[in-house]
Image: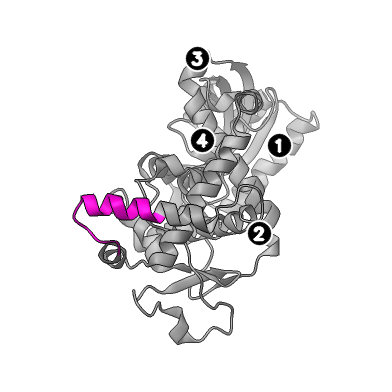
Amino acid sequence: MSSKPWIGSPTFILVMICLIVLPEAADEWTLSDEFDSSGGPELLEKTLVHPTTGATVVASVDDVPIYDVEIERFMQELDVFSDLTERTLQVYRSTVMSQLIRRQVVLAHLQTTKYRATEQEIDLAVAEVKEALAARGLTLDKFLLSGKSDIAMLRRNLAWKIVWTRYLEDYLTEGNLQRFYERNYERFDGTTRHVAQIYFGDPEHLEDFHWDVAFRDAVHVRDAITHNQTTFEEAVKAHSKSPSAAEGGDMGWITYKGPLDPRIHEAVFARPVGELVGPIQTKFGIHLLKVIEEKRGSRPWKDMIGEVREAAAAYLFAHVSDRHISEARVYYFGEEEGSEFDPSYSRRYGEEYLIP
C-alpha cells in the first residue's frame, strides 16, 4: 500500500459540498453554472469549445456541459493554492468538477418539483443583475464576456440559487436542525475524546517504510486484541513505534476538528467509545487507535447553529445527488473525476473557498 492523498474523508466531502451548495456564501449574482450544448462520447471536437466565449467543455450531464472556466473561477478566487504542485491543483480541479456535476444533477431534479424556478422568475433575476451592473457602469454583455460566460450560463446559475434556496428553506427548519445536531453533536459543540494509538511507522526513516507490511501487521494486532489474545496496552508495548508508547500510546484529548491528520479525527469520532479504530493510513505511517472516553462539549446553540445549518445543507445536497446521479448521463472530456485528495488541505480549503 503506497502513501498517497485521499479524497474519501467525510470532512473533505462535507467541505466540498458546502462550497458548491450554499447560496448565501456567494457574491451577489456572480456566475458559475452550466448551459446547454451537445454532449456525450461522440461529441465532435469543435463542439467542445463555446463559439462565443472560447470556454472548453470538460464534462457534461445529460447534454449540459461543465466548462473549464467554471472550475477555474473557483480556483482563481484564492491565493491559497499558489504554493501547491500542479498535480495537487489538478486534484482540486477534478474534485470541483465532480461537485459541479452533482450540482447539475440536483438542479435538474429540483426543476421537476415544487421548488422549480419559472422562466418569469429567472427573467426577473436577470433584470436585477442588469440593474446592479448598470449602477456600476457596466453592461451585462461585457460583464459576461469578461468571465467567458453567456446569458445561458447566467440563467442556469440564477435558477440554481432560486431552487436551492427554496429547498433549504423547506427542509432546514428549527426542528430538523435540532435533530441533525443531536445525531452529529460532536462536530459542533466542542466534544473531546481521549485517544491512544499503536503507531506502525518510523518518522525518521519513512523512505524505507514498507506500507504493506505495516498495514498487515496492524490488522493482525487489531484482530488479536479483538479476539482477546492480547490487550491494547500489551500491544502498545510490543508494537508501537511512537514515543507515546511509554505512556500506553496516550495521544491526549482531541476534538472533531484539530491539528492532526483529518483522517485520524474523523475515524476517532466515527466509532463508539471503547472500540478500536483502524488501521488508519496517514503520510506519517499506519495508526491503530482506541477511543478511551468522551467529554461532551458545552458550546451554546446560538454559536453552533450556523455550522449546523451548513452541515445539514451539505447532507441534503449529498442525499439528493446520490439518489439521482445514477439516472444521469455523465461524460468526461479530457478530465477525470476527482479520486484523490490530501486531507491536510481540507480545513484550509473550507476556510478560504468562495463560491463563484
Residue range corresponding to the magenta coloring: 126-140
Closest to the observer: 113 or 13?
113
Q: Which of marks 4 and 2 is nearer the N terminus?
A: 4
User: Type of residue at label 2?
Assistant: Ile
Q: Which residue position is annotated with label 1?
A: 222
Rounded to the nearest angstrom, the CA distance separating label 4 from label 3 is: 17 Å
Q: How many labels does the image show?
A: 4
> Where is residue 4 shown, x and y percent of the image?
50, 55
Horizontally, residue 137 falls left or right of residue 58, namely: left
Rounded to the nearest angstrom, the CA distance separating label 2 from label 1 is: 37 Å
The tag on residue 325 is 2
The tag on residue 300 is 3
Residue that appears at 55% across and 52% down? 117
Please check the rendered image and state whether residue 137 is part of the magenta-colored stretch, yes or no.
yes
User: Type of residue at label 4?
Assistant: Glu
Determine if residue 16 is in view.
yes
Secondary structure category for the residue under label 1:
helix
For the residues bearing labels 4 and 3, Cβ distance under 8 angstroms: no
Task: Please identify, in this view, whether the residue under mark 4 or under mark 1 is nearer the observer.
Answer: 4
